[in-house]
Image (cartoon, rainbow, N blue to C red):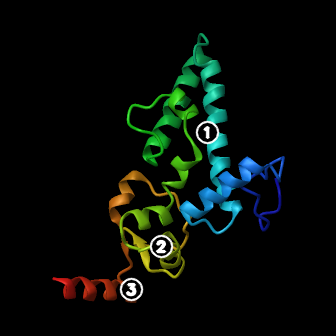
Amino acid sequence: MGDPKKARKKYYIPTHMWEKTRLEREVELIKNYGLRNKRELWRAEAYLRKYRRVARELLASINLPGKEGERARAQAKSVINRLMKYGVLQEGGTLDDVLDLTVEAFLERRLQTLVYRLGLANTIKQARQFIVHGHIAIGGRKVNSPGYLVRKEEEGEIGFYSNSPVADLVMVKAGAEE
């Protein structure tokens, strides 16, 4: 069961640490998405790996007769709905679409990326700083984790925290421009 005080690792390190093409791809993704270290990238890859493994297992058992096939179809629908809820998978997706996902789909749903894409921060690094310092809220609730996966329905609720001095500066700046 494990010690409740000691958190379990949520990522897997690559088996070949010094593979040139993988290292170059990782550095590019870290720069584009403003990740702090490779561990954050490996965590997103672990999410992807988990859902792809589940999709492969379900595809193998979905056409089985009886209760096993019904259970697999229900689980497949559940997995697809969960990925659509997070906006990783498009509406009307299938298990084959789950197998086609890339790590960028999960990185695009991080709070840090969405704050930058919504224009609340000038750079991806500034978006991370705003989140860590407590200036960003989702639906009025302060979130200080840049790796938070934002659900589709929460996307419109992202904004500055009401008590944040940055929110006041943005309002003053917007008023001065008009």
User: Which of the pair 131/64 is nearer the observer?
Assistant: 131
Q: Which label sits on residue 51?
A: 1
> In the rendered structure, are the residues bearing label 3 and label 1 in contact, judged by CB atoms less than 8 Å apart?
no
Query: Is the residue marked by circle 3 packed among few (<14), some (14-19), or many (20+) residues within 10 Å?
Result: some
Circle 1: residue type? Tyr
Q: Amino acid at mark 3?
A: Val
Mark before the other along the chain sequence, 3 or 2:
2
Is residue 147 placed above or below 11 in the rendered structure? below
Judged from this view, the residue extending furthest toward the left is 178
Residue 14: percent from left, percent from top = 79, 49
| Quadrant occupied by the C terminus | bottom left
Q: Residue 35's quadrant in the figure?
A: bottom right
Q: Which residue is farthest top?
A: 65
Depth check: 130 or 151 in front? 130
Residue at 48% across / 28% down in the picture? 94
Q: Residue at x 35, y 82 (%)?
A: 162
N-term-proximal mark, 2 vs 1:
1
- Ranked by sequence position, the earlier of labels 3 and 1 is 1
CA gap between label 3 and label 2 equals 12 Å
Q: Spatial distance from mark 2 to mark 1, Cα to Cα? A: 28 Å
What element does badge 3 sit on? helix
Residue hosting label 2: 127
Q: Residue at x 69, y 54 (%)?
A: 24
Q: Residue at x 64, y 19 (%)?
A: 60
Relative placement, left or right, of 36 versus 89 is right
Callout 3 touching callout 2 (CB < 8 Å): no
- The residue carrying mark 3 is 166
